[in-house]
Amino acid sequence: MRSTLRTTRPSPFCVIAEAMEVLGGNGYIEEGPIARRFREAPLNSIWEGSGNIMCLDVLRAFAREPRTREVLGEVLAGAKGRDARYDRFVDELMVELGDLTDGESRARYLTQKIALAVQGAVLLAHGPDTSAQAFLASRLSIGAPAAFGTLPVSVDSGAMISRVLRL
């Protein structure tokens, strides 16, 4: 059973635009490494190929190496059983990856879901629980487009802010 195709999550440029908005103009024009990364960000699609091409490369990896799906499933299974939202998301993803006959039309969607699943697995295994819960609530549960700044009220934002301030 395949999920309904949804719009994609924010592109890396949206992430960068959000970060630039937080830092303001000085965060863009200063000479430090963060500002340089902001200015260089649009070059990724020139050097590495557009996002669509990268997503098609992911599909080619699945076609070229038949064990790719199995290995991905093993990686994601390590975090299963810790959160029902994550478990549902991974189960759906693995079903969707089982039939790639129309993969090209779903390449971005599938690659996005793979990235979100891996991020969720890493956070569940190694991240602070408050961060993992916020990620799961905002990226795996509410559906696209999950814009930044749309965390549910139930997320303990104060605990995450306190953690950042201690770093």
Image (cartoon, helix red, strand yellow):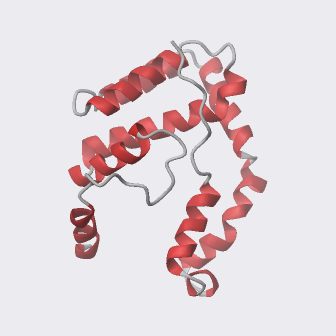
Relative horizontal placement of residue 160, taking residue 42 as reference (left or right):
left
Extreme residue toward the right, this view = 46
Q: How many numbered discs?
A: 0
Residue 21 to residue 111: above or below: below
Q: Residue 119, can we see it?
A: yes
Relative horizontal placement of residue 140, taking residue 10 as reference (left or right):
left
The residue shown at (43%, 55%) is 150
> In the rendered image, which quarter is residue 165 located in?
bottom left
Residue 20 to residue 139: above or below: below
Quarter of the image where the C terminus is located = bottom left
Which of the two residues, 127 or 67, is positioned nearer the viewer here? 127
Counting from the top left corner in percent of width and height, residue 92 is at 44, 21
Relative horizontal placement of residue 72, taking residue 32 as reference (left or right):
left
Extreme residue toward the front, this view = 153
> In the rendered image, which quarter is residue 78 located in?
top left
Q: Residue 71, can we see it?
A: no
Counting from the top left corner in percent of width and height, residue 14 is at 61, 59
The residue shown at (43%, 44%) is 139
Counting from the top left corner in percent of width and height, residue 137 is at 34, 44
Relative horizontal placement of residue 86, taking residue 53 as reference (left or right):
left
> In the rendered image, which quarter is residue 156 located in?
bottom left
The residue shown at (22%, 27%) is 81
The residue shown at (46%, 40%) is 116
